[in-house]
Structure formats: structure tokens, C-alpha cells
Image (cartoon, grey):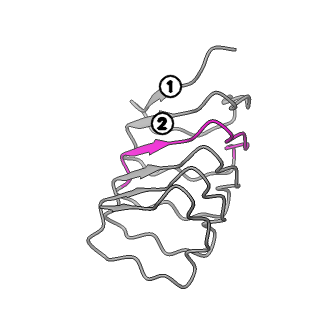
Amino acid sequence: SITFGRDFNQSLERLPLPSGLQRIAFGKDFNQSLENVPLPSGLQSIVFGCEFNKSLDKVPLPSGLQSIVFGDKFNQRLGNVAFPSGLRCIRFGLGFKQPLDDVRLPPGAEVSRPPP
């Protein structure tokens, strides 16, 4: 497990993440693209902090991902995101206002979003 501090807001492109990493949690200020970041295939959980609001369209989410939690400022469209088949839980913060009609979610995935 890796937990980044509240003020961390640096690119992860040159930071090799351990292959056995199962959980990554970003602090409040993290708002960097993950497009060119090789996430370990066994990563099971990603928790984004409040400030994260970057597209995941070109981010290869790991096949082992089971849970993804977005902070309050995340408000990106997800229609082109390839969610892994084992994803079980997606939780959105207060700022998420995007429709989910065109999002290809795995069967059985539980989606939690704030009321409109």
C-alpha cells in the first residue's frame, strides 16, 4: 500500500511503482494525469483525493482493479474508459455531474454517486 501526503502533486511517470502494490491512495492536492503511468496489474484499489480531475480515457486500468474512489472535484466523462471486468465498486464525489449512460461498467459493479 502507498499513501501519498496531502500536498503531493507530482507526476508519477518516472516513479516505478512496486509490482506487488495492491492499494494506492492520493492526497487532497494530487491532480496529475495517469496516462503514461504503468500501474501494476495486481493493483486492487485506487483512491483519489479531492482535487483530482483528469481524464482516464487513455489510462490502462489494471486488470486486478476492484475499487476506485473519486474525490469531490472529479467531473470527467467516462464513456471511453476501459474498466476492468473485476471492478466491483466505483464511488464518486460531490462534484461528479456526468451521465453514465454511455459508460461500459462490468456486470455487478456497484456505483455510488451523490444525489443530483
Q: Is residue 71 magenta?
A: yes
Of the numbered discs 2 and 1, the one sitting upstream in the chain is 2
Range shown magenta: 65-79
The amino acid type found where label 1 is placed reads Ser
Q: Main secondary structure of the magenta part?
A: loop
Q: Is residue 68 magenta?
A: yes
Q: Which quadrant: the C terminus? A: top right
61 and 3: which is toward the camera: 3
The residue located at (63%, 38%) in the rendering is 103
In the displayed structure, would residue 7 be above or below residue 98? below
3 and 45: which is toward the camera: 3
The kind of secondary structure element at disc 1 is strand
User: Quadrant of residue 40 in the image?
Assistant: bottom left
The kind of secondary structure element at disc 2 is strand
Q: Which quadrant: the N terminus? A: bottom left
Would you say the residues marked 2 and 1 are in contact, meaning their CB atoms lie under 8 Å apart?
yes
Task: Please give the count of numbered marks on the rendered protein.
Answer: 2
Q: Which mark is residue 59?
A: none
- Residue 27's spot in the image, x, y percent? 51, 54
Residue placed under numbered mark 1 in the picture: 112
In the displayed structure, would residue 89 be above or below residue 7? above
Residue placed under numbered mark 2 in the picture: 90
